[in-house]
Image: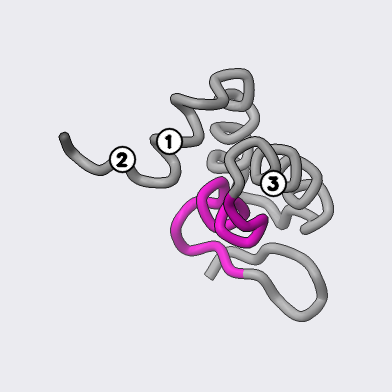
Amino acid sequence: MQRLSHRERLIRLMPAYQDEIARIERDAKIVELHQVGMVASEIASQLSISRTTVQRVVCREGVTYSRSQSLHLQ
């Protein structure tokens, strides 16, 4: 059996969050970390994985966390 990525695992186990994950991935603007954090905390608690891991999963590639607690596109 092929190992699922965290993102695939999230969507399979938490289908209710699929739209939220997609919305965050599509958003090319700066996203406040607390908005991602609230969603990430809920998903992380359901999957027993770290919130940071979930934040990385729900944010598209090229997005990093800055010290100002915002997500910035690189």
For label 3, the residue is 40
Q: Position of residue 62 (x, y in %)?
A: 47, 63
For label 2, the residue is 4
**Residue at the limit of the structure toward the top, as seen here:** 16
Q: Residues within 10 Å of mark 3 (few under 14, many from 20)?
A: many
Q: Write down the region rendered in magenta.
A: 49-64
* Label ID, residue 9: 1
Magenta-drawn stretch contains 50: yes
User: Which structural element holds mark 2?
Assistant: loop
Q: Of the residues under marks 2 and 1, which one precedes in the sequence?
A: 2
The residue that appears at 44% across and 25% down in the rendered structure is 12
Q: Is residue 40 above or below residue 55?
A: above
The residue that appears at 50% across and 26% down in the rendered structure is 13
**Residue at the limit of the structure toward the front, as seen here:** 48
Q: Is residue 28 left or right of residue 42?
A: left
Q: Of the residues under marks 1 and 3, which one precedes in the sequence?
A: 1
Q: Position of residue 34 (x, y in %)?
A: 83, 54
| Displayed quadrant of residue 42 | top right
